[in-house]
Image: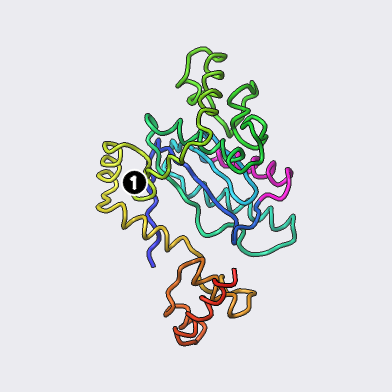
Amino acid sequence: MARPLRIQYEGAFYHITARGNEKKDIFTNDADRNKFIEILESVAEKYRWIVHAYCLMSNHYHLVVETPLKNLSAGMRQLNGVYTQSFNKKHGRIGHLFQGRFKAYLIEKENYLLEACRYIVLNPVRAGIVHDPLEWEYSSCRKTFGDRKRYIYLYPDLILSFFSNSLADAQKGYIKYVKEGIGKESPFNEAHGGFILGGEKFVKSVMEKNKIIDCEEIAKREKYVSRLNLRDIFAGKERDEGIAIAINRWRYSLEDVGKFVRLHYSCVSRIAKKAKNNT
């Protein structure tokens, strides 16, 4: 099956998210989070990424990055690959840490960058972990609002420039804007084809530049190529458990799973339905 299209060009802005395999934690403590930030810093320096916002949760993370060079995929292979190696070594585990490939939304800078950055730093508030986004240490919110320290991996200046030329006024405007977003719907619900967040003119420009005919078709390809293969799904599991996960979670067809486990599709269907009814 063909790999999904990654729209990459110089100066692109992206919202990136990666989740733990089977919804498991990818950060178990602060040491894990600090290690990830250390690796992010090295990746940003090596690939010249500009990180405008980030948020680390327990089983996933969010980044908003700008790529001056056409190298999103290369940087993400480095980021997730090196972190997986570090995490597995520290915690004595092997195998996949992340659920499939990362998800990337292309963002229009002028109209959607601020909203995207606001949405991701509000993750801990939506999850009920904190009441104020400034309370969560492992996001860019606190650093953008008042931290004078300079970071290789984070560049808050562009975000602040939307509010004022005065640093103090810009920081006040920023945190006011962030808190006004509490309770608002995700801007990514408006993404064209599930991967371009921007106005009609921006979407048209991106599609023409990358010779994309149908956004929905690209999104469909992305969905199915991003999932785990059947061999990985069944590894270390009982047959029926693997069948249930492949059908109910990863949306494989009855025929494909049946061929893999050498069962008739009707039998596969019964096993998947039984598991679903018991959850």
Please tell me whether residue 44 is drawn above or below residue 7 in the rendered image. Answer: above
Left or right of 244 on screen, residue 222: left
Q: Position of residue 180 (x, y in %)?
A: 51, 28
Please tell me whether residue 274 is drawn above or below residue 32 in the rendered image. Answer: below
Q: Position of residue 68 (x, y in %)?
A: 44, 35
Task: Using a 10 Å C-alpha cutoff, classify the residue at mark 1 as few (fewer than 14 neighbours), some (14 to 19) or many (20 or more).
Answer: some
If the image is split into quadrants, where does the N terminus sit?
bottom left
The residue under label 1 is 192
Residues 167 and 68: in front is 167
In magenta stretch: residue 231? no
Residues 267 and 201: in front is 267
Q: Position of residue 106 (x, y in %)?
A: 40, 42
Secondary structure type for disc 1 = loop
Q: Magenta segment range?
A: 27-46
Chief secondary structure of the magenta span?
helix
Inspect the image, locate mark 1, and give the three-letter code of the amino acid beneath it: His
